[in-house]
Image (tube, helix red, strand yellow):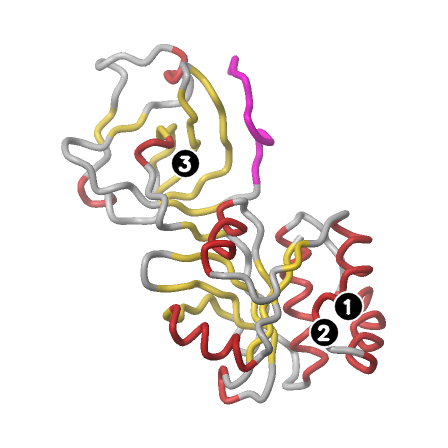
């Protein structure tokens, strides 16, 4: 496919939803984004309009940004302008911590963060560093050396407003958040992976599942965790 790419051709995968706009939503079959005309436009079936579309590639052609999507058996290209700006969910696989220990919670959350960056490491490879951090600090920014050594970047999000959290998620970077009182735990780490108008999505090492929480409840538990958050 001839194109000028605005991001990695195979971007880290994420989910989007269609905007509520007048008229029919449409997409293009692979290759047709080079010659957009009414004949090429394929109507998005009504049955999937409210579903999440998995995006795995971003391209620029015909002065438009295009998202390559799959949704069930369908695949093709959606124009970015038809995508909601108030929804984003990163396709980060949730992991369940093997035991109830704080160390396993922290290792599992960090492992998911690294996995989202395409870094495949065994939990045992980071356990020693996490145990040292656990014994000495427990301040998330003190994980900087570990995160930078593997991702080559760090983002301090301590105490920021929710708009900055949203912006980081729109950059396709999940956020490690320290919370307290969630799952009836004194303290734990979760991985924030998305948002919409009312909710935030997160991978919970305690349950090993994708969960959701209202912004107000997230603020309460995050505040109890001293408003600590980092990303890469």
Number of the front mark, 3 or 2: 2
- Residue 144, magenta (yes or no): no
- Percent position of residue 15, x then y: 42, 47
The alpha-carbon separation of the residues under discs 1 and 2 comes to 5 Å
Is residue 160 depicted above or below 101 in this figure?
above
Mark sitting on residue 142: 1
Are the residues flagged by discs 1 and 2 in contact, CB closer than 8 Å?
yes
Is 104 above or below relative to 154? below
Q: Nearer the viewer, residue 106 or 49?
A: 106
User: How many numbered circles does the render carry?
Assistant: 3
Vertical side of 195 occupied by 118: above or below:
above
User: Where is residue 138 shown, x and y percent of the image?
Assistant: 73, 77
Q: Where is residue 24, by image quadrant?
A: top left
Judged by its main secondary structure, the magenta piece is loop
Residue positioned 71% across, 54% down in the render: 154
Q: Secondary structure at mark 1?
A: helix
Q: Secondary structure at mark 3?
A: strand
Q: Would residue 84 be found to the left or right of residue 190 on screen?
A: left
**For the point 51% across and 86% down, which residue is it?**
181
Q: Residues within 10 Å of mark 3 (few under 14, many from 20)?
A: many
The answer to whether 89 appears left or right of 126 in the picture is left
Q: Which residues are magenta?
A: 1-11
Mark linked to residue 69: 3
Q: x, y (%) of residue 170? A: 49, 46
Earlier in the chain: of badge 1 and badge 3, it is: 3
Which mark is first along the chain, 2 or 3? 3
| Magenta-span inclusion, residue 7 | yes
Which residue is labeled 2 in the image?
139
Q: Residue at x 65, y 83 (%)?
A: 99
């Amino acid at each position: 496919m001839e194109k000028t790419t605005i991001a990695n051709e195979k971007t880290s995968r994420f989910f989007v939803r269609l905007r509520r706009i007048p008229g029919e939503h449409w997409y293009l079959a692979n290759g047709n984004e080079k010659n957009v005309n009414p004949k090429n436009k394929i109507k998005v079936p009504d049955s999937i309009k409210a579903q999440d579309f998995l995006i795995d590639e971003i391209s620029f052609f015909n002065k438009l940004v295009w998202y390559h999507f799959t949704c069930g058996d369908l695949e093709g290209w959606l124009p970015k302008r038809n995508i909601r700006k108030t929804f984003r969910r990163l396709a980060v696989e949730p992991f369940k911590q093997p035991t109830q220990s704080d160390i396993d919670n922290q290792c599992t959350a960090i492992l998911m963060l690294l996995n989202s960056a395409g870094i495949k490491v065994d939990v045992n490879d980071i356990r020693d560093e996490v145990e040292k951090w656990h014994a000495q600090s427990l301040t998330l920014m003190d994980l900087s050396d570990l995160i930078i050594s593997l991702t080559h970047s760090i983002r301090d999000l301590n105490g920021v407003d929710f708009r900055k959290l949203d912006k980081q998620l729109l950059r396709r970077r999940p956020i490690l958040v320290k919370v307290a009182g969630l799952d009836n735990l004194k303290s734990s780490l979760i991985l924030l992976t998305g948002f919409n108008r009312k909710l935030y999505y997160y991978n919970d090492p305690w349950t090993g599942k994708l969960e959701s929480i209202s912004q107000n409840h997230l603020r309460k538990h995050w505040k109890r965790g001293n408003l600590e958050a980092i990303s890469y």
